[in-house]
Amino acid sequence: MSRSYSPRIRLSRVGLSRVVAVAVAAVTIATTAACGSDASENLSLPDLLITSDQMPANFTVATMTVDDLIRANRATLEQSMTVAFVPAECAPTADAAFNPLLNEGNSALLVGTAQDGTFSELISSVRRDIDADRRATTGPCRVVTATPSKGTLAGASIVTTTTELPAIVEPTVEQSFLVRSESRTTLPGGTPRARTGLMGNVLVKRPNGDVVTLQVGVSAQEIESPGGAAAPAPMSDAAFAELVRDAIARASR
């Protein structure tokens, strides 16, 4: 799942990567863990997703399959190859290694939509390189400018600022990385647009010894921002952290 989140195609996370921020603009667009390995072995990946009533308020389940996500991610990654990043060393790499390995057999997806945003949760047995996510979005890569050279966004400036949120430390968490991502897109001669999203990437340990990748993302709709102000966040940082903890509890069963 990256820097901004699309209400239509990029929901893993996408993310929160700068690749996703570019794709979003281009299209304009998780109980207590069960005990015992026997119980965990009987749970399929979809069983590890949060329930619909655990989604953020006002969100309802939307129809999107893992195959839909794979196709969207493939298009996003292909498009990213025509994008210049400044600083250049901040181009995202985790998505390029993770997404091609996803399939219906090793991943499960839950998507929710609301009038003013989207929610997504991905569970996968494919291990994501969370350190690569961190390198591409913190330190000198906290603020990155992406400039597409092709398509409807050719010549646009997409500035993404990422703020790392406190990591979740629990016995079932091997590694976690939570961020708030604010992107601002300016087309030549156009009104700037802004979007804010929240993304969590977590490696979760299950009782049977497996480690699964958990991605949780919530994004607000993109809005016009002529004055340069950031778009409102879809929820508070604290509420998002609780949502991720709920997802961890389900995934760690």
Image (tube, rainbow, N blue to C red):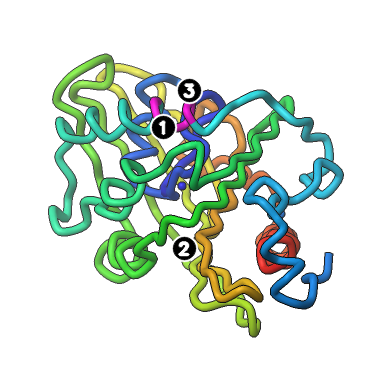
- Name the quadrant containing residue 209: bottom right
| Three-letter code, disc 1 | Ile
248 vs 175, left or right, is: right
Residue at the disc numbered 1: 70
As drawn, 69 above or below 235: above
- Marks 3 and 2 sit apart, C-alpha to C-alpha, by 22 Å
Count of picture labels: 3
160 vs 234, left or right, is: left
Q: Residue at x 66, y 23 (%)?
A: 63
Assign a secondary structure to mark 1.
helix
Assign a secondary structure to mark 2.
strand
Residue at the disc numbered 2: 163
Label 2 crowd bin: few (<14), some (14–19), many (20+), radius 10 Å: some
Label 3 crowd bin: few (<14), some (14–19), many (20+), radius 10 Å: some
Q: Position of residue 135 (x, y in %)?
A: 29, 67
198 vs 152, left or right, is: right
Residue at the disc numbered 3: 29
Assign a secondary structure to mark 3.
loop
Residue interval drawn in magenta: 67-71
| Three-letter code, disc 2 | Thr
Q: Position of residue 104 (x, y in %)?
A: 50, 36
Numbered badge on residue 199: none
Q: Position of residue 77 (x, y in %)?
A: 27, 35
The mark closer to the camera, 3 or 2, is: 3
| Three-letter code, disc 3 | Ile
Q: Of the residues under marks 3 and 1, which one precedes in the sequence?
A: 3
- Marks 2 and 1 sit apart, C-alpha to C-alpha, by 27 Å
The mark closer to the camera, 3 or 1, is: 1
Q: Residue at x 31, y 55 (%)?
A: 94
Asked if labels 1 and 3 touch by Cβ distance under 8 angstroms, the answer is no
